[in-house]
Image (cartoon, grey):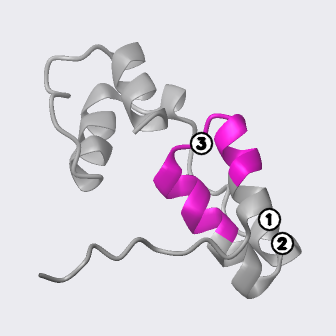
């Protein structure tokens, strides 16, 4: 039976820092591995183009939850949806 292969972290120090700041395991791993691959300054410069969740409508937030493969979001209010998206 094949063993479950767990991805390796390329920058564990950055990963732990991001986790302490509240990032999800998946997000922290993506950022830390990208920073190790491309350099921290390059990773820091990209992104930041999406509007804040507070500026989006509820249908837009539900669409984002759907894109991320989340469940149980259809009856949530805007604040609850934002919390779900930030902490998935």
What's the mark number on residue 23? 3
57 with respect to 14 (left or right)? left
**Which secondary structure, mark 1?**
helix
* Residues at marks 1 and 2, CA–CA distance in whole angstroms: 6 Å
* Front residue (pair 18, 75): 18
Q: Which residue is mark 2?
A: 40
> Nearer the N terminus, badge 1 or badge 3?
3
Which residue, given by chain and number where applicable, does mark 1 sit on?
44
Q: Quadrant of residue 59?
A: top left
Sort mark 3 into few (<14), some (14-19) or many (20+) by Cα contacts within 10 Å.
some
Residue 19: horizontal and vertical position, in percent?
65, 43
Vertical side of 2 occupied by 25: above or below: above
Residue 41 percent location from the top left of the image: 88, 72
Q: How many dots with numbers?
A: 3
Instruction: Assign a secondary structure to mark 3.
Output: loop
**Quadrant showing the N terminus:** bottom left
Drawn side of residue 44 relative to residue 47, left or right: right
Magenta: predominant secondary structure element? helix
**Which quarter of the rendering shows the C terminus?**
top left
Structural distance between the alpha carbons of marks 2 and 3: 17 Å
* Mark 2 closeness class: few <14, some 14–19, many ≥20 residues within 10 Å: some
The residue drawn where x is 63% and y is 34% is 22
Region rendered in magenta: 16-32
Are the residues flagged by discs 1 and 2 in contact, CB closer than 8 Å?
A: yes
């Amino acid at each position: 039976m094949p063993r479950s292969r767990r991805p390796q972290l390329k920058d564990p120090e950055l990963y732990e820092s991001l986790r302490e700041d509240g990032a999800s395991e998946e997000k922290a791993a993506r950022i830390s591995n990208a920073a190790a691959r491309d350099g921290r300054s390059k990773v820091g410069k990209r992104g930041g183009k999406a509007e804040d969740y507070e500026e989006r409508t509820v249908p837009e937030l539900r669409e984002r939850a759907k894109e991320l493969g989340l469940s149980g979001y259809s009856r949530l209010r805007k604040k609850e949806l934002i919390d779900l998206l930030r902490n998935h």
